[in-house]
């Protein structure tokens, strides 16, 4: 579904991605783990078109048998239209928009008004707090509620692939649990997920496969279970001895 | 001083404030979405006045048609300026945009002087616009009533547009965060273009009002009203449309009352008063009356 081939990105003076190649199959949850500054967020921003790579290709086909397109030649808004939704780091709800407007703006490229309203209602049914706070400015929600709002907003474009950046950041453990349940549900609905996480134990538990990013390069790759059992990973990312 | 005199001053303040508010909205919308103070905004006001002159004198268009022409000309000039002068500098430091807008302003003013000459021009407005209408003990000219009503209609339409339409919501999202807006699929250049088109169309209509009310226009007529509307936008809280409206009326009213209520020898200081008021307001409320902190979110 998505294939990065030797992607190099320079940001300011730093060589943030040094030849990243990875692959995601339809229906998978793939985790991308690594320390702060390893290039995880840069990877997502490059896929979604916010950053332009210096070299390399990013090939995306929304489903099996559909033609591949090179995302590095497309604008961010066209990448959304192609079926990729990027839920950025730090939640980033729109404070000037109400909770419901935040959801609706996620469907900006869609024109099926009735279906959009139905999807808003579905998301509100899944997260009732988004209904009871519907008219509040987006930033008046708590951190966990904002996370649900931005995941809902990202789903409103009906993506085939969801890029999710640090959904657990700054949330209480019990909320993190809930977010991961939501992810499992998203997968059940047929959306492929690329998950960037600092919370490596959760990411490895949930991810079918995982890549480990270090200083802009991928250093390890394997199934979630394999990596969770790898002593180096345990030492570096899982707080093991 | 009697009641009728005071009432007529208030009416004049309302009329002047309506025009300031229409210009100030453009300053505020454009600043809100691109963090640019567009110093060429007052010149679009001038262009609106000349478009009025041209459509009345050259093609003898009826007044509603004149209004439509001026709206379209203003929007088109705004789009053109954005495309030619500001879009190429997107991402450059803020000061680059200020200087570009000064350059645009100087180019428009000099082109205007070259093509239509610096000589003020008069034009005949339809007689019905000068008819006196008794209103609450005053005799008010039709044009004055039209100015206030038209301004209010345009402002309500704009507020409804920004509040309730899909494009309006997308513009608010863009004003808040370009990157996240792009992740929603919003073409931010398009939103910025729309903000320029709307803001410039409103400034052009203010030019139409000004020219029709005072019956005289010149290539540099936009300089002072432009600056004062900028003051109004800052007083109201730059970036906020309702703030710009409020600032426009507060400033228009204050300026007229300053001139009307103080002894005549002070009236020469009206501009000093306007800019003094700006400094005072900013000392007390650095973000203006309705402005939030102007810090840009990362």
Image (cartoon, coloured by chain):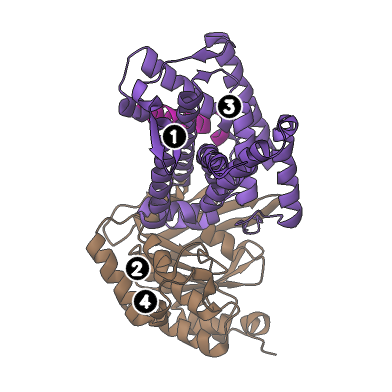
Chain colours: A brown, B purple
Front of the two marks 2 and 1: 1
Q: Earlier in the sequence, mark 2 or mark 4?
A: 2
Mark 2 belongs to chain: A
What residue is disc 2 on?
A26
Q: Nearer the viewer, mark 3 or mark 1?
A: 1
**Chain under disc 4:** A
**Residue at label 3?**
B222
Asked whether the viewer can see residue B93, the reply is: no
Note whether B267 is above or below B26 in the view shown.
above
Main SS, magenta region, reads helix
Residue sitting nearer the eye, A43 or A133: A133
Task: Give residue B109's position: percent from left, percent from top.
Answer: 60, 19
Query: Can you identify the residue that label 4 sits on?
Result: A186
Confirm whether the magenta stretch covers residue A188. Answer: no
Assess whether residue B84 is covered by the magenta stretch.
yes
Q: CA distance from mark 2 to mark 4?
A: 13 Å
Magenta-drawn segment: B69-87
């Amino acid at each position: 579904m998505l294939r990065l081939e030797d992607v190099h990105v320079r940001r300011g003076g730093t060589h943030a991605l040094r030849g990243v190649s990875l692959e995601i199959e339809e229906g998978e949850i793939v985790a991308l783990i690594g320390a702060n500054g390893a290039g995880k967020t840069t990877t997502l921003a490059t896929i979604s078109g916010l950053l332009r790579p210096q070299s390399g290709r990013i090939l995306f086909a929304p489903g099996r048998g559909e033609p591949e397109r090179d995302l590095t030649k497309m604008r961010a808004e066209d990448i959304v239209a192609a079926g990729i939704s990027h839920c950025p780091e730090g939640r980033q709800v729109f404070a000037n928009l109400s909770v419901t407007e935040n959801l609706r703006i996620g469907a900006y490229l869609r024109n099926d008004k009735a279906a959009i309203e139905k999807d808003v209602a579905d998301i509100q049914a899944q997260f009732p707090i988004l209904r009871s706070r519907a008219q509040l400015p987006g930033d008046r929600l708590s951190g966990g509620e904002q996370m649900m709002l931005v995941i809902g907003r990202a789903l409103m474009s009906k993506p085939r692939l969801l890029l999710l950046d640090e959904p657990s950041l700054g949330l209480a453990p019990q909320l993190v649990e809930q977010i991961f349940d939501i992810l499992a549900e998203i997968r059940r609905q047929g959306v492929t997920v690329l998950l960037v996480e600092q919370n490596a134990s959760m990411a490895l538990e949930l991810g079918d496969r995982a890549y480990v990013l270090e200083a802009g390069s991928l250093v390890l790759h394997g199934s979630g279970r394999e990596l969770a059992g790898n002593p180096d990973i345990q030492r570096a990312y899982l707080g093991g001895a | 001083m009697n009641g009728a005199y005071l009432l007529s001053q208030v009416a004049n303040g309302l009329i002047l404030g309506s025009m300031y508010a229409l210009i100030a909205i453009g300053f505020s919308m454009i600043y809100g979405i691109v963090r640019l103070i567009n110093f060429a905004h007052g010149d679009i006001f001038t262009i609106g006045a000349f478009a009025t002159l041209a459509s009345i004198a050259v093609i003898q268009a009826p007044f509603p048609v004149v209004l439509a022409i001026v709206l379209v000309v203003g929007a088109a000039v705004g789009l053109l300026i954005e495309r030619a002068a500001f879009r190429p500098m997107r991402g450059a430091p803020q000061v680059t945009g200020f200087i570009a807008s000064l350059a645009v302003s100087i180019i428009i003013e000099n082109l205007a002087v070259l093509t239509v000459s610096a000589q003020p021009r008069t034009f005949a407005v339809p007689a019905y616009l000068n008819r006196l209408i008794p209103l609450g003990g005053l005799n008010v000219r039709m044009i004055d009533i039209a100015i206030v009503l038209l301004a209010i209609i345009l402002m309500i339409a704009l507020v409804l547009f920004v509040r309730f339409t899909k494009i309006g919501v997308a513009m608010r999202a863009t004003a808040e965060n370009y990157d996240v807006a792009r992740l929603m699929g919003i073409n931010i250049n398009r939103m910025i273009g729309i903000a320029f088109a709307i803001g410039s169309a409103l400034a052009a209509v203010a030019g139409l009002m000004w020219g029709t009310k005072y019956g005289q226009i010149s290539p540099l007529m936009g300089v002072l009203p432009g600056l004062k509307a900028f003051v109004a936008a800052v007083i109201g809280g730059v970036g906020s449309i309702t703030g710009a409206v409020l600032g426009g009326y507060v400033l228009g009213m204050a300026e007229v009352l300053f001139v009307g209520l103080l002894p005549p020898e002070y009236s020469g200081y009206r501009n000093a008063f306007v800019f003094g008021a700006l400094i005072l307001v900013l000392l007390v409320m650095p973000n203006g009356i309705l402005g939030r902190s102007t810090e840009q979110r990362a």
